[in-house]
Image (tube, rainbow, N blue to C red):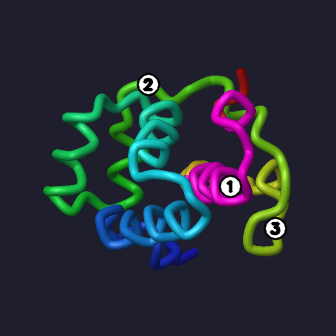
Amino acid sequence: MAKHNIYKMSVSEVYPHYITKAEKKGRTKEEVDEIIIWLTGYTQAQLDKELEKKTDFETFFVNAPNMNPARTLIKGVICGIRVEDIEEPIMKEIRYLDKLVDELAKGKSMDKILRK
């Protein structure tokens, strides 16, 4: 089966859209970064470096230093599909990130987004 096109898309291509989506709803770039860092275990410096290198989504998630085990608590629908029903591991990680950014844009508190 062919891999989805998003796997080879660079995170830095999509990242500005995450920021725009958050800022339109009064949230910040720093909150988006906090979500990505929470999910992946990258430090801010590592995240900045991955964005600068234009790392693709597949590599970004495969090489993530410490995927947060609490990410499995992320439930709900993104792009018409329940995240908990996605079987392909990399796609699931991408959709977890999409869902967290959606929650941020919908005004959820950071404690709830970060499953505290």
Query: Secondary structure beneath disc 2?
Result: loop
> Can you give x and y, in whole percent of width and height, for residue 31 in the image?
48, 43
Instruction: Choose the circle earlier in sequence order: 2 or 1.
Output: 2
- Identify the mark nearer the N-term, 1 or 3: 3
Q: What residue is rendered at 50% in x and 63% in y?
A: 23
Q: Position of residue 9 (x, y in %)?
A: 36, 72
- Asked if one can make out residue 91 in the rendered structure from this viewpoint, the answer is no
Amino acid identity at mark 3 = Ile
Q: Which residue is mark 2?
A: 66
User: What whole-number distance in Å separates the C-alpha atoms at marks 2 and 1?
Assistant: 19 Å
Q: Amino acid at mark 1?
A: Lys
Q: Which residue is mark 3?
A: 81
Quote the CA–CA distance across marks 2 and 3: 25 Å
Residue 108 magenta: yes
Q: Which residue is mark 1?
A: 99
Q: Is residue 96 magenta?
A: yes
Q: CA distance from mark 1 to mark 3?
A: 11 Å
Q: Amino acid at mark 2?
A: Asn
